[in-house]
Image (spheres, rainbow, N blue to C red):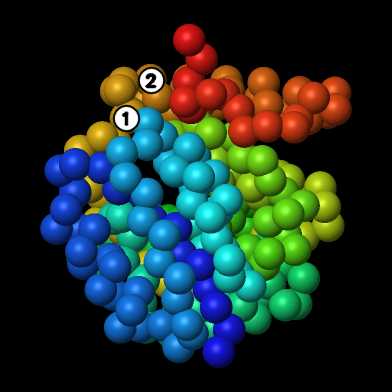
Amino acid sequence: MTLISVVVPTIPGREDLFELVIRAYFDRTGYDLELIPQYGHPTVGCAWQAGADQASGEYIHLGNDDCEPHPGWAEPAVEAVEAGFIPSPQVYAPDGTPQGLPAWGVVDVDWTPVSCAMIPFLSRKQWLAIRPLLTSHYYTDNWITTRARNAGWRCRLRTGYAFTHHWAQPGRGAGMTEPDRMAYDERLYHAALLMAQNGQWTEPWPPGGRLP
């Protein structure tokens, strides 16, 4: 069976959701799984980098401890990767309201071009071309999308690659208010783009997910 490495960051205060999500992966995946939980990292980007470095699967999926996969989530993601794309999921709120790209509140046509590969899913070949990661809390999925696009892999919505986002609140801003963290990480993202353009992108950055 094809092996998918699933990286799931988590932190204290999210134990119940973490158990729900992990159980859903094992119950709703038609592939062999290598589960790689990551505990206590300061940012999602740090956790994804650490987990992906340990992964041995043919595919690498960078999940979240409050994003519950729906049945059959993996097949559309694998199909997209094998067709030369990066999949982006259809996300739902706990009440079933559609969230995500290209527009919140609707479920768009499958394979629609979108701007960001949220909840990333990559082949090993794609991962090796995209790494290392921006280690911010937010904008790491934007970084993955940009690196993938520059390498020739565009992002497409896969409606069957679906998740319920439970919006866990503990740790959401990673040490700041959420708006402040979003603004801070956007600055990191643009700084990282400039570093990559200048040929300076060789290691995960910034150390610890945040400048001193």
Q: Looking at the image, which residue is at 40% across and 24% down?
A: 181
What is the quadrant of residue 189 in the picture?
Answer: top right
Disc with the residue nearer the chain's start (1 vs 2): 1
Percent position of residue 102, x then y: 55, 57
Separation (CA) of disc 1 from disc 2: 8 Å
Percent position of residue 210, x then y: 48, 21
Amino acid type assigned to the residue bearing label 1 in the image: Gly
Q: Looking at the image, which residue is at 53% across and 55% down?
A: 54
Instruction: Verify CB contact (< 8 Å) between mark 1 and mark 2.
Output: yes
Label 2 neighbourhood size at 10 Å, few (<14), some (14-19), many (20+)?
A: few
Choose between 211 and 75: the one closer to the eye.
211
SS class of the residue under badge 1? loop
Choose between 108 and 120: the one closer to the eye.
120
What is the quadrant of residue 176 in the picture?
Answer: top left
Residue at the disc numbered 2: 180
Percent position of residue 156, x then y: 65, 66
Choose between 109 and 70: the one closer to the eye.
70
Question: Up-down: is 15 above or below 44?
Answer: below
Left of 188 or right of it: where is 166? left
Percent position of residue 111, x then y: 64, 73
Question: Up-down: is 119 above or below 136?
Answer: below
Answer whether residue 42 is visible to the viewer in this image: yes
Numbered label attached to residue 173: 1
Among all residues in the image, which is located at the extreme top?
A: 212
Amino acid type assigned to the residue bearing label 2 in the image: Asp
Answer whether residue 138 is visible to the viewer in this image: no
